[in-house]
Image (spheres, rainbow, N blue to C red):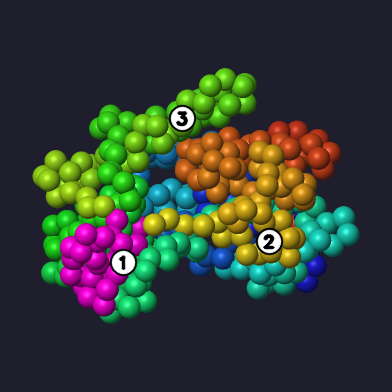
Amino acid sequence: MGRHLDVVVIGGGQAGLAAGYHLRRLGLDFVVLDAQDAPGGAWQHTWDSLRLFSPAAHSSLPGRIMPPQPGAAYPDAAHVVDYLADYEQRYDLPVVRPVRVEAVHRHGDVLRLESTSGTWHARTVISATGTWRRPFVPAVPGRARFRGTQLHTVGHRRPADLAGRRVIVVGGGNSGAQVAADLAYGTALTWVTRRPPRFLADEIDGRALFDHATARRRALDEGRTDTGGVASLGDIVAVPPVREARDRGLLQARPMFARLTATGAEWADGTRAEADAIVWCTGFRPALSPLAPLGLRGPRGRIATAGTQALAEPRLHLLGYGDWTGPASATLVGVGRPAREAARAIAERLDVRRPAGTRPRRTAAAARRP
């Protein structure tokens, strides 16, 4: 199999769909290869009680406002999955799944993608694989000695799974706070953070954070003083479940422990906490393994970019990995702008001048059956 396209997008989550929306509007011939069995990206694998940081109207991809979830000011993950599935269908985006891209190689004037559905050739590749498949757990002394259960955020589903047990939740960001709030009522909870948790003011949500991040990027681009970004406001959005647990006094954080023992955690002063389970809410790393043959990764595993375009390989764009690929680009509301900029840059580079809104050739859509 050797299909040739203007663009291949790797990943069918929110970033891949936002890219597809803008590629479609510019009339490029493209396909979205998604490793998942169903629409929804990483949202279909989160814990049951996860809530967005913003109301639905401020958590939308380009062209389609997310409808509100009945009875919920902040939508849950299942609502996001439904929205993404509808979005994909509404814009008739050519998503092929399940297809896992295993490697991207240079191949003359195109990039060659080896996948579980065969070989694809593209004049440009957009990598939108996110981070969910690369959970990060720090190398804490004694971690291998601990005899209890260890989960990352990706493995947590519902409080009932750990009910009645002694649980240590590690992490002072939004995931750590939400998981700690989730477990605060039915477990003997110890919440551990590297620094005292900083809750944002209750009225600040994801939309305000996006606006702040965008203002900071604009200031830096114009050579003005760094505003400090989102981190200057705090670390944790007080979504309703977090706010309730906090106000009940159930989210009392302890500083990071020095080591793990066979039966729990130990601090530098010798105090201990026994535990049956540890939930590591310690973040993720970019899932970039298919791009390894291109030899582009630098310090901290990142690929140097100008905007979304890889500096050492102009046929590659990276989308949705965080601020280094666009302000707040790892969020629903934030990914639209860098997706639009990437699509425009690709169309200009490929000298594609089809009218805006023109539908691309059906080559990609016909490839839905790998």
Among the two numbered marks 3 and 1 on one chain, the one whose residue lies closer to the N terminus: 3
- What amino acid is at disc 1? Arg
Q: Is residue 370 visible?
A: no
Residue at the image position 73 percent from the left and 38 percent from the top:
345
Which SS class for mark 1? Answer: strand
Which SS class for mark 3? Answer: loop
Residue 60 location, x and y as percent? 46, 39
**The quadrant where residue 258 appears:** bottom left
Residue 285 location, x and y as percent? 51, 57
Q: CA distance from mark 1 to mark 2?
A: 35 Å
Residue at the image position 28 percent from the left and 43 percent from the top:
197
Q: Which quarter of the figure is the C terminus placed in?
A: bottom right
Q: Is residue 217 above or below residue 303?
A: above
Viewer-side label of 1, 2: 1
Q: Which quarter of the figure is the N terminus placed in?
A: bottom right
Q: CA distance from mark 3 to mark 1?
A: 32 Å
Identify which residue, 280 or 183, lies in the foreground: 280
The residue tagged 3 is 228
What stretch of residues is rendered in magenta?
Answer: 256-281
* Side (left or right) of 284 relative to 168: right
Residue 218 location, x and y as percent? 57, 25
The residue tagged 1 is 259
> Is residue 351 on the magenta stretch?
no
The residue tagged 2 is 291
Viewer-side label of 3, 2: 3
Q: Is residue 267 visible?
A: yes
- What amino acid is at disc 3? Gly
